[in-house]
Image (cartoon, rainbow, N blue to C red):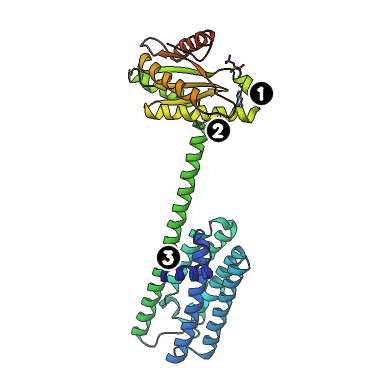
Amino acid sequence: MYKCYLKKVLEWLLGNKDNPFEYTHHAILLVGTVLYIYAAIANYYLELAGIYSIYFQLVLALLIFVIWYLSRWRNQFKKMRIAFITIIILVSIPANWIGNGGSNGPTYFVDLGLLIYISVSFKDLGIYRRLGQFFCIIIPIPLILFEKEYPDIIFQYATETQKQIDLTITFIIIGLFLIVMMESLSTRFKLERNKAEQLSKKLRNLSEKDSLTGLYNRRILDKQYSLWKTQDRIFSFALLDLDHFKKQNDQWGHNYGDDILRTFSSLLKDVAINNKGFAIRLGGEEFVLLLPLSADGSYQIIRQAADTFSKTPLLHGPVTFSAGVAQSTPNDNQSELLKRADNLMYQAKNKGRNCICK
Ligand SMILES: Nc1nc2c(ncn2[C@@H]2O[C@H](COP(=O)(O)OP(=O)(O)OP(=O)(O)O)[C@@H](O)[C@H]2O)c(=O)[nH]1
């Protein structure tokens, strides 16, 4: 209950978790706003900075909050990301440098954190990403030159302890920030990997399965035949063909014909699964059962399937099929085996259909 409530609040503040970069970016903006307000209050009460510095921090807090609002609620995520890093690089980092001990202070950590943030989460921003990286890398140079020219403007720590505290706190904040960044990166990586896996599964299905019946297509027949052949296994190849299927189509329509094909396929699928074999649609109303059994064994199985199918209630009466069953021999190849099964199937047709020959 409490977790659910927290999740809803976070979603309201940060957006959808399935979009981890957006989610993290909004979190950074809100944390940035709070940190600037906190820094302003701490500076005011501990008298660590002058009043203009405090106003400056409050204005920055307000600016970052407005950026969060426009990004989260006005669909300006992309623009606001650019606005945010522009402000951080051109305003916040120089101000931090001047207000926090210059080259003795913690601004290097902030700059490095920002460089990693831009590199990781700005992959879709092309030139802006490169510009951001460039400025992050070179910005210490003008700041050091400025410090050399105007050393009095740089705020220096009153004591060594003050400096150590500032460095440590900033280090911890940037460290935590990097952890959040890496988490969001790995979440995104996981989401994309899942998507890729689903897509490749779909593609595999599309390339191996017939879309109407869900049975395997010829590709699997070739693959499985070669495998069993190299393993020297006993197996049979049954060619099955629906009887007078054209008549069904002509009389009751193509959709009804499709229904028959699906019903027949579902029966063949069960037969294949129960016998550790493969049910394949060769095309049209022609099917193959590849079974790891002798011709006699396969014949028995297919005979039972024929009985079941002839009793299957179809809307416009029973439909039968004819089949030819040929067992693979050490000397034949796939096309010879198919040819033998084909001849046997035509024998079955010639015998008046609803017949299985082996
Ligand atoms: N509904 C439907 N019909 C198909 C599909 N593929 C092929 N057909 C039809 O299947 C029929 C096959 O007819 P024929 O090869 O003449 O064979 P048959 O009528 O079954 O006759 P016999 O095999 O001699 O018993 C044709 O009318 C094709 O249009 C399909 O995916 N869906």
Picture residue at 46% right of the left edge, 10% below the top: 340
Q: Say which residue label 2 marks.
A: 211
**Front-most of 70 and 357?**
357
Q: In which quarter of the image is the N terminus?
A: bottom left
- Label 2: few (<14), some or many (≥20) within 10 Å? few
Characterize the local packing of mark 3: few (<14), some (14-19) or many (20 or more) Cα atoms within 10 angstroms.
some
Q: Work out whether mark 2 precedes mark 1 in sequence or the reverse, and give the earlier one.
A: 2
Callout 1–callout 3 Cβ contact below 8 Å:
no
**Residue 140 can be seen, yes or no:** no
Q: Locate the C terminus by quadrant.
A: top left
Q: Give how far apart the Cα atoms at labels 2 and 1 are.
A: 24 Å
Foreground label between 2 and 3 = 2
Q: Is residue 346 left or right of residue 108?
A: right
Under tag 1, what secondary structure? helix
Q: How far apart are marks 1 and 3 (CA)?
A: 66 Å
- Badge 3 marks a residue whose secondary structure is helix
Q: Does 186 sit above or below residue 166?
A: above
Q: Position of residue 164 (x, y in %)?
A: 35, 80
Q: Can see residue 8?
A: yes
Residue 135 in which image quadrant: bottom right
- Residue 239 in picture, x, y percent from top left: 48, 17
Residue with the mark numbered 3: 180
From the viewer's side, name the closer residue of 83 and 195: 195
Tell me if the residue at label 1 has its CB under 8 Å from ligand 1.
no
Spatial CA distance of label 2 from label 3 is 44 Å
Foreground tag (2 vs 1): 1
Residue ID for mark 1:
251
Residue 4, horizontal then vertical, whole percent: 44, 67
Q: Are marks 2 and 3 in contact (CB under 8 Å)?
A: no
Amino acid type, label 2: Ser
Dot placed on the residue nearer the N-terminal end, 2 or 3: 3
Q: For the residues carrying marks 1 and 3, which lies nearer the camera in this image?
A: 1
